Image (spheres, rainbow, N blue to C red):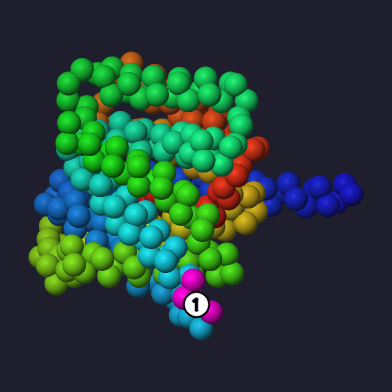
Amino acid sequence: MAVAATDRAPRAWLGYALVGASAGFAAFNVIFGRLMIDTGVRPLEVSATRIYGAGLILLVFLVPVLGRLRRGHIAPIVAFGLVGLVVGQGAAFLAFSDSDVAIVLVIIFTAPLFVTLYERIRLGAVLPRHAYIAIVVAVAGVGLAVAGGGVGGITPRGFAFAVASMIAYAVSVVLASRLPGDLPPLARTAASMVVAGIAFCVIVPPWTLPIDLLGATATFPGRLGFALPLWVAVAFSVLVGSVGVFVTWIAGTRIVGAGASSVVGMAEPVLAAAVAWALLAQDLAVLQVIGVLVTVGAITIVELARIRTRRLDAPDAPVEL
């Protein structure tokens, strides 16, 4: 028995490291997305580029199982692709374009609270009292993060798109539990990417993407800022910020479980806030920092409680990229 326990421990650490890497990749991806926007790429073009690039790469996981697709698989895959990847991502980058990254993310990451309320009202899940107190604390933390620095941290437009992305994120968590479990996770992800790619062909056709900007110089204006060609930011966004996020998350989740992964993933807003301060010069007031930390901590408490009484299966891949 002692040998088995010893064998499991390193694998657990590896799982948490992979999920932590996924959260870090996602945080940096937001920063690189904002850099692309500041260099002249429109927010929806950023989302479309990531979907097109990641979708093409992930096809390698979908093609071998195409014969296993059934008519019943289509509706949940289409719904997840449109809500989670098109609406969720598109609204998020529209919010990031003119508001502080950390504040937008902390709003988006309140989605688990609404999933919890959905499970309580619709599915009858009952959480311990402290979880409901934590929901109130999390909402108060969001208010502090938004208002604690005065005017300027987030615009009304940014707030509206952040809320829209949060709603899409919450709905996606529900939809993720309905994705076909007989397909491998990366195949399901790739299928959803294909759906999102088809939708973006209407919203931002590939031939309209600003290819001429790829050679432009993009500059991080922060304390640790530096310059790089825009194509490097695009490559990072596709390879690391999209494909890397999914691959590391799914690999880590297979070791530690979806519930533990969802809790570790809550590190993303905090990591993004630190990176935005260092690379984008997005400073938060002390009250805003407190608000971000309080919100993330409270949501983590709610997620831990929800995992123990979960009525919905936690997704085995990150819902919001």
In the image, is residue 64 above or below residue 42?
below
Query: In the rendered view, does 278 fall on the left or right side of 294?
Result: left
- From the top left corner, tell me how far across and down residue 268 is, in percent: 42, 40
- Please state the extent of the stretch shown in magenta in the rendering: 68-72
Disc 1: which residue: 69
- Residue at 11% in and 52% down: 40
Query: In the rendered view, does 151 fall on the left or right side of 301?
Result: left
Can residue 173 be seen here? yes
Query: So how many labels did they put on this image?
Result: 1
* Residue 71 lies within the magenta run: yes
Q: Secondary structure at mark 1?
A: loop
- Residue at 60% in and 36% down: 125
Quarter where residue 156 is shown: top left
- From the top left corner, tell me how far across and down residue 70 is, in percent: 50, 77
Query: In the rendered view, does 245 fall on the left or right side of 223?
Result: right
In the image, is residue 118 above or below residue 246?
above
Q: What is the residue that sits farthest to the right in this orientation?
A: 1
Q: Amino acid at mark 1?
A: Leu
- Residue at 53% in and 24% down: 132
